[in-house]
Amino acid sequence: AQSQPLPWVTQPSIWHGTSPGPSLQMMPVGGVDRKSTARYCNWLHNGKVNEAWAFESGAYDTSTFNDVSPFTDQLTHSPGARFWIPTRDEWFKAAYFDPDRFGPNLPGYWLYPDGGNDPLIIGLPEEGGETSAGLWGPHPFEPYVNVGSYPHVRSPWGLLDVSGGLGEWLEDADPERQGRGAYGTSVFHSFPEFRDRADYNGGGSSPGDFSAPYGLRLAATIPAPGAVMLVILGGCAFAQRTSR
């Protein structure tokens, strides 16, 4: 499955309004607040029509959004949504669950999001690395790598870049409606060997926080014979990225 670029997002270090150069078009996008992520889901739900109404409803009703705390934003996606921000359970299952974990048709969960129980190797692909998580330390001037740079590192469901790049927004909110959750590791995270583990609780931030170091990975339904299949789409990038 593939995701589409946010129509108004720019390169990680520059605010809205300019277009990224060719060398940045496949790098992960930071500073995408959770409200913009919801509007992006609406845009996809409405067929990517570049009209204001297409961003206002569909997966999420933006008339419920506010910019104070506690927030009043719609807590979960609307029934019939074609694209939405994954819940904690959906993201977790896509990252760690293996239907054949203990043998054919014997399901279970791995400790790390590559279908294994050992920490991923931090480093650039050409150095034998398996994740860009934590790369800011050894490579402070070149912390980002293109999405899909570790094609040999996939979750059991085939997702790329579950570790590294940026953390990703979740649909879940805390009970006090102060913030929304997030999963995944960033190039800036220290000790990603702990943050990548299935037993790590994740992070989060205010849903309107543009400074939060999070990107997005979306969930969608696709028709299947006699059923509806849930697919977790690739995280946000400047250009299309493949996650399966």
Image (spheres, rainbow, N blue to C red):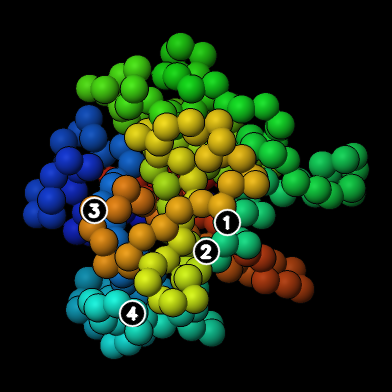
Looking at the image, residue 110 sits to the left or right of residue 90; the answer is right
Kindly indicate whether the residue at mark 1 contacts the one at mark 2 (C-beta within 8 angstroms): yes
Q: Mark 2 points at which residue?
A: 86
Q: Which residue is located at x 32 percent, y 65 percent?
A: 206
Q: At numbered mark 4, what does the secondary structure look like: helix, strand or loop?
A: loop
Disc 2 + disc 4, Cβ < 8 Å: no
User: What separation in Å lies between label 1 and label 3 (alpha carbons)?
Assistant: 22 Å
Question: Within 10 Å of the Cα at label 3, are there few (<14), some (14-19), or many (20+) other Cα atoms?
Answer: few
**Of the two numbered discs 4 and 1 in the rendering, the one whose residue sits closer to the viewer:** 4
Separation of residues labelled 2 and 4 (CA atoms): 19 Å
For the view shown, which residue lies furthest in the front direction? 176
Name the outermost residue toward the left.
Answer: 17
Amino acid identity at mark 2: Pro
Please tell me the numbered disc located at residue 75. none
Q: How far apart are marks 2 and 1 (CA)?
A: 6 Å
Nearer the viewer's eye, disc 2 or disc 3?
A: 3
Q: Can residue 148 be seen in this view?
A: no
Residue on which the image places disc 1: 91
Instruction: Please name the residue that numbered disc 4 is placed on.
Output: 71
Residues 173 and 55: in front is 173
Mark 2 and mark 1 lie on one chain; the one further toward the N terminus is 2
Disc with the residue nearer the chain's start (2 vs 3): 2
Find residue 27 and report its horizontal and vertical position in percent.
Answer: 31, 37
**Residue under pointer 3:** 211
The amino acid sitting under disc 3 is Ser
